[in-house]
Amino acid sequence: MSTAVTVSELRKSYGEVEAVRGISFEIASGEIFGLLGPNGAGKTTTVEILEGYRERDAGSVTVLGADPARAGDSWREQIGVVLQSSAMYQTLSVAESLALFAGYYERPRDVDEVMQLIGLDEKRDAHVRTLSGGQRRRLDLGLALVGDPDLLFLDEPTTGFDPQARRRAWESISSLRSLGKTILLTTHYLDEAERLCDRVAVLRDGRIAAIGRPGELTGALPPTEIRYWQNGREVVLRTDEPTRVLNELTQTALAEGHELEALEVRRPSLEEVYLSLTDEASE
Amino acid sequence: MRLFRHELRYALLLYSRSRELAFFTFLLPMILFLLLGFAYGDEEIQGVKGSDYLLTGTLGYGVVATAFAGLAIVLVIRREEGILKRLRSTPLPAPTYLVAVLTATMVAFLIQAVCIVAVGMAAFGASFPSHLVSFVLALILGAASFAALGVGLTGLIRQAEGASAVVNAIYFPMLFISGAFFERDTFPAFLQAVAAVLPLTYFIDLVFGVVYEGDQIWDRVGDVAVLAAWGLAGALFAARRFRWTPSEG
């Protein structure tokens, strides 16, 4: 399988701040690859270097056989970009917006087909200003797709969505897999990466803390926490077998006839996942 | 060329759908023309009928409102909203985009100029401009120069919210000092000194000369040179400072 993106020892600083500190990865053609990390981890900087918006300080980058920093308009025929925040002319309709962008490409996709793909065919004559946040984001995806690119960049495609809108967006993105597109997406949602990506690189402080299939990464999760209060003190248990431990705990409590006050069972937050992954990486 | 026509069509469509632009850059100059015209259109200003003088001034108002202020504000808003950044990810070449936007601006101003002349003729009995070719060339030169200055100005504005304020702070005083509505000769010396460097002064003089003094555009080399120099300065500044991406932080 050919390689769509190669990144080697990439570095980028803004003044004193090192945003990206030597990262390397490859994306195969047809792969959905995720950059996962909290805000400020270097995701957007990395993606914007690959999109050709930013110059790198060091390292080498090849995207579809070209260096994005020097690639021309014909290279842009082959990429589609969804930026982190939506931006489109407010006074154009959905259909007009897509037709405007379709006109920029040599071999665009059919506008009606794209509207169906993103589920906005019923909003075709609605002006962008009247769309909801989720609908705008889907239009963003449509604008990135209308040129029929080989490689798609999706920078936090579902940030700020309600759960239903996120599921719809996930469906749209999943359906691109069958079109054979290569996709690089950034996200700070672990479940999004798990659901969509073939492989994920976890970024923290400008470095790759872990890289692999989502299942491999969640295997590295810290154990589940069980918390409750007893005799005025908080008890915290950490376990890889929450079902068994919780069962024993509640049975004992029932048998002894006392209440587990403020009982709480929680999976580690994403922040803790990052922390544990970076801790491992630095060991 | 196909891309240019495509982009121009949408640039005009976007222009026609913007209510703010329609009012502030298109209608307001004409409203003011009517108000001032009825107020003192019958007096004599600079040796001609007041309404004739105001017609020239209103064309000056139109060129700065449309080509300078309107263009600068629209470009800053599009930049800060991220629309320009998104366009750069498509194969649309940057010069094609800019030339299409400038052409749309030019078209809007020429339509506006036709309306201003029509209002002048209908409401105040102004005569049709005598040297039509020179008249149109003067309008195009003015629009090009102010558009270049407008694009250059975007490099000095960081936020979309402040764009109107900055632009208005520049162009309203310029309108008065350059004598768009009043005869400059009655101004104090220091204001006349300021007027002597402003590009709008030379645009108004050029148009006045062509319309009321029987000059052709090539008889007014001085005005043409100053206007062109300002336009060139704006273009050079724009080439260095125009940005496609939003301001950071």
Image (cartoon, coloured by chain):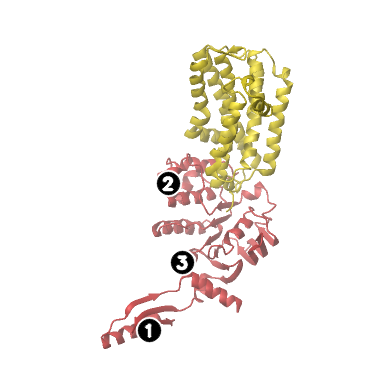
Chain colours: A red, B yellow
Residue type, mark 1 in image: Val
Do pointers 2 and 3 mark residues of a single chain? yes
Disc on the earlier residue, 1 or 2: 2
Q: Are marks 1 and 3 in contact (CB under 8 Å)?
A: no
Residue A210, horizontal then vertical, whole percent: 57, 72
Disc on the earlier residue, 2 or 3: 2
A123 or B203: which is nearer to us? B203
Q: Chain of mark 2?
A: A
Disc on the earlier residue, 1 or 3: 3
Q: Left of A98 or right of it: where is B237? A: right
The quadrant in which the N terminus of chain A is found is: bottom right
Residue type, mark 2 in image: Leu
| Residue holding disc 1 | A245
Residue B54, horizontal then vertical, whole percent: 56, 19
| Residue holding disc 2 | A131
Q: Secondary structure at mark 3?
A: helix
Q: Residue at x 58, y 40 (%)?
A: B75
Q: Residue at x 48, y 23 (%)?
A: B31
Name above or below for residue B139 compared with residue A102. above
Residue type, mark 3 in image: Asp
Q: Secondary structure at mark 1?
A: helix
Q: Can I make out residue B66 in this image?
A: no
A4 or A34: which is nearer to us? A34
Label annotation for residue B29: none
Q: Can I make out residue A168 in this image?
A: yes
Q: CA distance from mark 1 to mark 3?
A: 25 Å
Name above or below for residue B195 compared with residue A161. above
| Residue holding disc 3 | A191
